[in-house]
Image (tube, coloured by chain):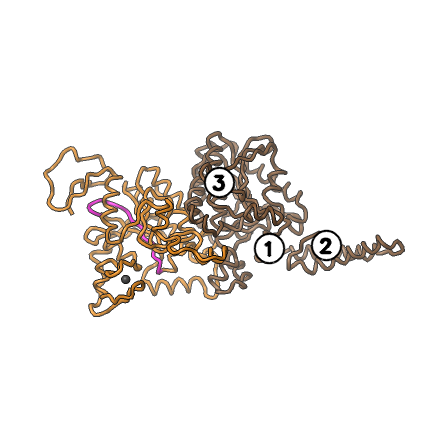
Amino acid sequence: MTNYLEFEKPLAEIEGKAEELRAMARSNEEMDVEDEAKALDKKAADLLVDLYKSLTPWRKCQVARHPDRPHCKDYIEALFTEYTPLAGDRNFADDHAVMGGLARFNDQPVVVIGQEKGNDTKSRIERNFGMARPEGYRKAIRLMEMADKFGLPIITLVDTAGAYPGKGAEERGQSEAIARSTEKCLQVKVPLITAIIGEGGSGGAVAFATANRVLMLEHSVYSVISPEGCASILWKDAEKMREAAEALRLTAQNLKELGVCDRIIDEPLGGAHRDKDAAIDSVREAIAAALADLSNEAPEVILSNRRKKFLSMGSKGLAA
Amino acid sequence: MNWISNYVRPKINSLFSRREVPENLWTKCDDCGTMLFHRELSDNLNVCTNCGHHMAITPRDRFTALFDGGVFAEISVPEPIADPLHFRDQKKYPDRMRAAQKSTGEKEAMLVAEGEIGRTPIVAACQDFSFMGGSMGMFVGNAIIAAAERATELGRPLILFSAAGGARMQEGILSLMQMPRTTVALQLLKEAGLPYIVVLTHPTTGGVTASYAMLGDVHIAEPNALICFAGPRVIEQTIREKLPEGFQRAEYLLDHGMLDRVTKRTELRNELITITRMLMKKPPRVVGDLPPPDPTAVQTATEAAPQETAKE
Ligand SMILES: [Zn+2]
């Protein structure tokens, strides 16, 4: 059962009709619908190409948030072997919004950290919809320190709407936790590679994504604020999210031009959720290339290049 | 060591610059409602003389009150690219900028200066909430880098007064990038062994709190300042309950271990002098007549002309 996005409604109708025809044919052997169904398939395929040819920023946000999109857990399971989760911030709790631990990437030991949104009601609640609390950032800090100590590259998978606007999260100092996690990213001397696989939401994302290489999936987004939040502040109307998404320049394509994203990873036609394996394979290839790229650099150079990169951020704007 | 090549030498541009305030005007305290003379209020650093409520103070007025004799040299901040995203909401970003410049008389949301407090050389940066909510964009990033660079160059502590609604949305992702960007600048200052003291003033929220405002060696807040990442309204909408009185205020953060101290604005200067002198291993400040010369007090300081036992 495919979950269709709002803008995919026409596609849903055509694909639905084709499915209906085939279902009818299955129950009635007299019927020959294959030609008609094939014509519909063709129409659907053309429409899919058309829809995804130039997605508006707001549509990209919807694709990035698609419930069927491969999530952190899917990537960890497919890209790594011997994944050994390591829990807790040694202080207060283990944050289930943040997955992390030791693993092997193409046999090489690494530390992997990422936000997991969950894929059904139960797991979404357990994962707090991928929104970390302070413990999540502090777990990440602990894991980054361990990676640094043992010289293991760090791979982060970013997919979060942002930090959690909750009472306890504020009480336990999420500002400080985010600030320290970002700072830790700027202290480790091992390669740090980030793949933004869905949503890169504000401080919650930057705390994980201050990396040597920031890779973004084609339809992922990365922004200082959600389009809805921006719209309600600047337009005083949360329904103006389309305009806000446009103005914020949050697409991978815009961010590449601004130097925030280092590489865009192509998604299968119709988005990563239409062919999870293909999407995950592309991410595997991009991470491997980034790791190979950094493998010959001295630890001090890896760190100083990362710092220089962020210090010079913003030296170019978008073309007029 | 220079991180920004077009760094400009500071120039003294503020000598006893406290603005003349008309005698006959009154301001109503927005907390207790008492009518206060402008002069009385500004002499008390915009703190209500009746209830102690801390009202906003401009960076220029703060620096005038902070630095010895009101003398400070402004450190110029390199100009970032204007409107890098060609941002437009209901207004164009450049129009919003011009309106803010006109209403504040300032170029941008942060002022950086060097000078002495209690004869202790420092570099200070102060965020201006009245300029587009003090929002952190490329300019604020450049200002913090310039401040950290200058402090490192002179071997001085950096004192930063934060005040912001958060990141500047009109600069989109580039405003978010100021979180790591300013963090790098502060790391270089810290690695040079120099103190970084943050004074959190009302309000300090969002990405500012989640970066340079929470990375100090010492965190001091002004009384009742709102300090948070997510604002109270956003939280109330999320959890659908009313937050307790004083939630996310300075005293609450002090209770929860996020601050070192909550200090009244009128006592802040003395406290900053005391703390910076200890962190810089300087002898206690001398108030009043100069003591007899003490040869052991002479240290190898990095300043050109160390004034170890000067009087105020
Ligand atoms: Zn009052």
Give the chain of mark 2.
A
Query: Tag 3: Cα neighbours inside 10 Å, few (<14), some, or many (≥20)?
Result: some
Give the chain of mark 1.
A
In this view of the protein, which residue sits in the foreground, B230 or A47? B230
Q: Earlier in the sequence, mark 3 or mark 1?
A: 1
Expressed as whole percent of the image width and height from the top left, the position of residue B130 reads 35, 60
Q: Which segment did they paint magenta?
A: B117-130
Give the chain of mark 3.
A
Question: Can residue A280 be seen at all in this image of the molecule?
Answer: yes
Q: Which mark is residue B5?
A: none
In this view of the protein, which residue sits in the foreground, A120 or A294? A120
Residue plotted at (44% across, 53% down): B230
Query: Tag 2: Cα neighbours inside 10 Å, few (<14), some, or many (≥20)?
Result: some
Q: Secondary structure at mark 3?
A: loop
Asked whether the residues under the numbered discs 3 and 2 touch, taking CB atoms below 8 Å apart as contact, a structural biologist would say: no
Instruction: Using the image, determine if residue B32 lies above or below residue A81.
Output: below
In this view of the protein, which residue sits in the foreground, B52 or B24? B52
| Marks 3/2: CA–CA distance | 48 Å
Q: Which residue is mark 3?
A: A93
| Marks 1/2: CA–CA distance | 20 Å
Q: Colour of chain B?
A: orange
Q: Which mark is residue A45?
A: 2
Q: Secondary structure at mark 2?
A: helix
Q: Amino acid at mark 3?
A: Ala
Q: Nearer the viewer, mark 3 or mark 1?
A: 3
Expressed as whole percent of the image width and height from the top left, the position of residue A276 reads 66, 45
Q: Nearer the viewer, mark 3 or mark 2?
A: 3
Q: Which mark is residue A62?
A: 1
Q: Colour of chain A?
A: brown
The image quadrant that residue B94 belongs to is bottom left
Expressed as whole percent of the image width and height from the top left, the position of residue A91 reads 44, 38
